[in-house]
Image (spheres, grey):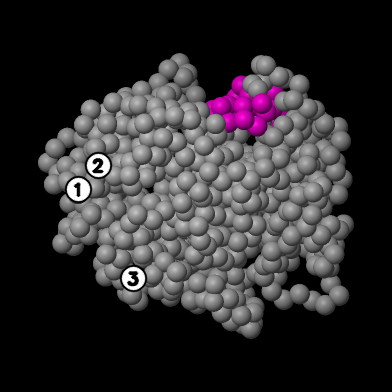
Amino acid sequence: MIALLAAAAVAAQATPAPAPSAPPVRQYHDLALSPSGDKLAAVEQVETGQENHDMHPALVVRSTRDGQILASYDPCPTCRYFSPAWSPNGDSLAVMAVDQKQFAAQLIVIEQGKPRTAATFSGVGDQTRWSPDGKSIAFLATVGARKLTGATQAGIPLTGEIGETNDEQRIAIVPATGGADIRFASPADTFVYEYGWTPDGRGFVGTAAKGNGDNNWWVAKIEAFDAATGAARIIASPKTQANYPRVTADGKSVIYIGGLMSDFGPVGGDLWSAPFAGGEPVDVTPNFKGTFTSLSMTGGETYATVLAGDQTELVTLDPVKGPKKIISTAAASFGASAFNGRFAFDASGRMAATEAQDFEHAPILLAGPVAAMKQITHDNDAAPAFVSARSVTWKNEGFDVQGWLIGPRDVTPGKTYPMIVQVHGGPSAAAAPNYLSHGTVNDLVAHGYYVFEPNPRGSYGQGEAFTRANVRDFGGGDLRDILAGVDAVEKFAPIDDKRLGIYGHSYGGLMTMWTVTQSQRFHAAVAGAGIANWTSYYGENGIDEWMIPFFGASFYDDPAIYEKLSPIFYIKNAHTPTFIYVGERDVECPAPQSLEYWHGLKAMGVETSLVIYPGEGHGIRKPEHVHDLADRIVGWFDKHLGS
């Protein structure tokens, strides 16, 4: 795998830079490898850097030998497809299909090349799982859902009596043969975030919490659910957020990834273990200098992916002792499914498949023996490299810090360039290689900018101590790491220090709002879905449980720390022209936060602009809004930095 990516990098370096425009690129999501390892199913669609849903997706089955398409299925033209899963004998393929506009879901089973509907319900669903004996199919169902699952999705309109009704995501089961009603295997008052069958097929293990599903993942427990009765039992109350609970083959233990996580989805932490019968969790990998990002158990083997600095590693694990062996490593992004793990495996655990991409190379599918996977798709071979990219490392205040510098492929000798510092969301996350580069990055590079994506303290990739290093210190050490990273970049890259901009979304939006009140180094700023005032934010957002691990107490118990870290209280120091945007129905970073900051800048006479996108949540997703936003961001920087 390393040789494959390295060879591609050399080829790209020798290719003349093409005209910078976003190409159509085939993306691969939700991989599932057949039990024998000979077939790979994936949800595939064509996308560009500025649109998430250009072409209707299809469920595609390929040969793992050469990537040849064996079959393609699209039985629901209005649906999105999620979490395909092969039956234990490999004869059938199940997939969840959801019409996200009508909130209608169906479980589809494909047998002998023909799709049939095994279950339908009003709502949304995901995480399809066959029972070990192949007689039943389980999935997560939110019956009567009023919104799409997750706090990053647009919230429901806040009208009428608030907070009296919750959408509950439950484990549902149907016979594999169909013809029976859905029955539930988890309580009606419990939101199940993720789950998996126990090895004996008698039940499930999952992460779950009572109450509002958007808010309570941060207090979720690891629970066991009886497949026959739906009765729940608490296995452990983690000391951290938890993801990927897996029962060991002997049925005695549950292992999971536990860490300081700021949102459901971006996974990072140490490897933890707890007795399946119940008991105190134990950190199996204390002081590990990396971040575990996914976990899989198959064929008696346990695998994990690890982010270590700028490298993504696939490792084998001992559930008691931790990592045993590094299987592969590369400076690339791997994985196309958050629930299945970043790699898909066959029943033996000897064959694997994944998706890989980096800043210069479009996504490919890899498949084959775990230690010798090879490229099997060539859909994107003609996709050119639009940017150059390199990993940057520097030291600051005793920390080893890493980031990515993305820039034009052709640099004029003697010329200096403006640079945008893009701060990632989270804070518990990391900037990682991505060919489409979140859309706007490629646009900025095409307009003559360098883009610097730092991973300051609070990020993944350096271990849990590094991830926890910004607790009660947002905008302190993390900002100093970022500024030190800018200094490090300017030592070797042709950057004009008088034409620096800063840009971020979510935590990155907060950091943008904060930075322009603490430093005059940046001459233009873009703050997306930011947080201006932690004191008012505490009562406005729909996910206040996330704040306790980061602030140490609620606002009501320790208001001083919330005020200390709020950009609005330093607004008189702001002089940087700032464009602000947010979704109208953002659950995580509500629009009033952006309005409050915009109002403060206006009062200070600072040039500013605010756009609130109608109907949008924490992510801006509608194609017309995505295009508009990209144009506004590039236009704002062009106006104030003069590329």
On the image, numbered disc 1 is attached to which residue?
133
Residue 490 image offset from top left, x and y in percent: 83, 62
Asked whether, in this view, residue 401 is left or right of residue 121, the answer is: right
- Packing grade of label 1 (10 A; few <14, some 14-19, many >=20) is few
Asked whether, in this view, residue 514 is left or right of residue 65, the answer is: right
At 45% from the left and 69% from the top, the residue drawn is 371
Q: What is the secondary structure assignment of the residue under circle 1?
A: loop
Q: Which residues are magenta?
A: 532-552
Magenta includes 548? yes
Tell me the number on the disc at residue 586: none
Residue 518 image offset from top left, x and y in percent: 84, 39
Question: Disc 1, disc 2: CB below 8 Å?
Answer: yes
Residue 225 image offset from top left, x and y in percent: 31, 31
Look at the picture and state if 362 lies above or below 486: below
On the image, numbered disc 2 is attached to which residue?
201
At 43% from the left and 58% from the top, the residue drawn is 343
**What is the distance, in whole Å, between disc 3 and disc 2 at their CAs?**
28 Å
Instruction: Give the prevailing secondary structure in the magenta stretch.
Output: helix
Can the viewer see residue 363? yes
On the image, numbered disc 3 is attached to which residue?
64
Look at the picture and state if 558 lies above or below 119: above
- Residue nearer the viewer, 283 or 96: 283
